[in-house]
Image (spheres, grey):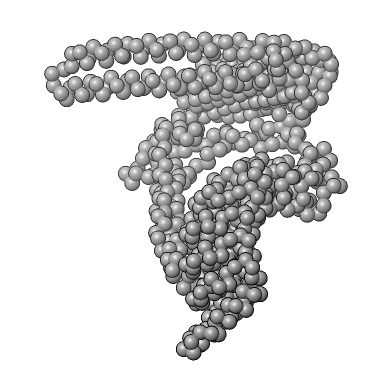
Amino acid sequence: MCADSTSPQNPEYAIMENSEYMKEQHQEILLGKEEGLDVSAYSNPELNWLQMEQIRMGIKDKVDVSAYADPSYSYETMKQIRLSSYSSNDLSDYLDRGFIDDELEQIRLALEDGLPIDLWLTDDMYVQQIHEIRIGMYEGLDVGIYANSQYNWMQMREIRLGLEKKLKVETYTNYLFSHWQMQEIRLGLEAGLDVSSYAKLIFSASDMKQKRQKLMTTRTPETVNADKLGIVLSEIAKKEFSILVENNGNKAFAFIPWVPGNMVTEADIYESLESRGIVNGIRHEAITELIKKRRMNEKVLIAEGTPARDGKDGWYEFFVRLDLPRIPAPLPDGGVDYVNIEAFEMVDEGEKIAVYHPAQKGEDGQNIFGEVLHANKGFEKKPLRGEGFMIAPDGVTYISRMNGKFEYRNGRIIITNMIIIREDVTAVTGKLEIDGSVYVVGSVYSGGYIEATGDIIVEQNVEKARLVAGGNVMIKRGSCSKHDCFIDAKGEVSSSFFEAANINADGDVKANYIMNSEINTMGKVIVSGSKGMLLGGKVRAVRGVDTFNLGNSSHIKTFLEVGRNALYDKQQAIFSEKREQILDQLSMLEKQWNRILQALPPKKEEAVKLIKKLNAAIVTKDHELADLDADISKLANLTDQDMKAVFVRGNAYEGSVIEINKIKYMLPSHVFRIMFKLRNKSVVMVKI
């Protein structure tokens, strides 16, 4: 039984009670659990709550959080790795080079915009320098002029501003100039002055400013007003800002750095948008707020495109229940309520089973440049396959051809004949052979015999009888005899209990209690509930055993053979024989193909028809061979050397014998909650 989520035995509860966690960390754990996430990935006291948040968000978005779930990473570094995964960019190389936090953000934004920042990035650069290089690249400037770690970020900015205004920046690109000196030279160039008289290292920034202002005042009277305007624009009303386009042209942000005298207007923003060709989704209120509230050093969304909305995929609306045999109700002790399970769904001839709703078209969108973003049309589903139904003239409505049992298995509709027997089946009833499924309202007693191509469902009990099914066998109450009850099924066999029964099944065998029975199954034997017990007899189950209790305190011998046992060998022999038959048939078809090619019929239509027919036969056999090889591989994988073969979720008592892949182990003493598995050609026990 699963532990209650508030139980001290529950491992997640233990995590939550760890005193090392702060309140915020507790909150992140709780949020993850409420969202149905695996919180073990970040249940580590070494992580602060901000780091936990980044891991939780990654898990929620199905990101591989192992790339950053490391307490040594700051939450900002984690955030950048997480965001980069959405655009399939890998920041691991940059992490190895020592870049962190905001530095990674600048690199990520450059990569998302398709900018080759690696051309200019060196390991000793810091965030502001990387920002200046990224902005310059985005503006299409020749950043090679200043992308050198010898420049600090303020020097880089002065050179970038000069490049934006197409100035002769080589006048002040000497890295020995301070950024204040560079600024004085840049302002002089913007004013159209001959700066050669003061663009020298021997002059301080203050000296340069005096000389620049003197040059301004010695100009002709006609230019005084222009000089004054130039001073105001260059020194008082600076206009430094960036328009950042992100998300593949679907969003534009404005960034106004805090610089003394920076006076950007709405007109400046709109002019820049127009020059960049940004015409769609402009957020006028955001631009007004940006300027009026002077939101400096903040990325503000000022334009957003309309995303394309993909169409809805086609879907089937069913008018019958699909999952009845698969969801029996649990009992209080964890067992399964086989008695009250609704085992099948009946349909009438002409009844509407399903309607197909075709895929819908999507809605095109537009990016901020006004370019159309084409929406994908929804995918159409393939027509339903199966038997016992027809498709109405409208091409989308599925209708039953008969009164019978409805099943939906592996994407196929199966409607088969269902015979309902409203009395007990005994020797007097005689041998019942039915093409379809059988539902016995009562019990099957001594001498009863039922053989069906479909399922056999018995509402009450089965005693001394024989049941043979091409599908599943379900006995709601139970099966009890003196080893003269025989059940054979191509599918699953289930019951409340089995006692002294002989069962052969291709699928799983399920019950709440199995005692002194002989069971052979290619699937699993599953015994449910805290009172569930697998006791006595012999079980051969290729895929393993899952039971609550194994054996009892009286040490009754209980034998389990799992994995590559005699059943496995028999199935592999069947597979091998079938494979040889298919290969022989393919060989014959290929020989026939060669003969036909040498002597084709004279009429072209007959020749084409014959070739197509033979080719179809070859293709069919090829598919059969591929499917068979897949089944062989699947069976081998289920029984590999590391298989977890037997789970005992309660008590396992001495006297039980477990054999895995023909390697035997006798349990010497009582153990609790244990798993038996094969490791290095030995059967070992592992606590669960």
Q: In the figure, is residue 401 to the left or right of 410?
A: left
What residue lies at 41% left-to-right and 37% top-to-bottom? 384
Q: Nearer the viewer, residue 309 or 536?
A: 309
Residue 252 is situated, as x and y percent measured from the top left of the image, at 51, 63
Q: Nearer the viewer, residue 112 or 438?
A: 112
Q: In the figure, is residue 249 to the left or right of 184?
A: left
Residue 104 is situated, as x and y percent measured from the top left of the image, at 63, 51
Q: In the figure, is residue 389 to the left or right of 283?
A: left
Number of numbered callouts drawn: 0
What quarter of the picture does the N terminus occupy?
top right
Position of 47 relative to 549 (above/below): below
Position of 61 relative to 418 (above/below): below
Q: In the figure, is residue 391 to the left or right of 255?
A: left
What residue lies at 54% left-to-right and 54% top-to-bottom? 110
Residue 136 is situated, as x and y percent measured from the top left of the image, at 53, 60
Task: Confirm whether residue 629 shows in the render.
Answer: yes
What quarter of the picture does the C terminus occupy?
top right
Classify residue 184 by image quadrant. Answer: bottom right
What residue lies at 51% left-to-right and 76% top-to-bottom? 193
Outermost residue toward the left in this view = 602
Residue 641 is situated, as x and y percent measured from the top left of the image, at 65, 17
Q: Nearer the viewer, residue 448 or 646?
A: 646
Outermost residue toward the right in this view = 19
Task: Confirm whether residue 498 shows in the render.
Answer: no
Position of 261 relative to 631 (above/below): below
What residue lies at 58% left-to-right and 72% top-to-bottom? 198
Q: Nearer the viewer, residue 351 or 541?
A: 541
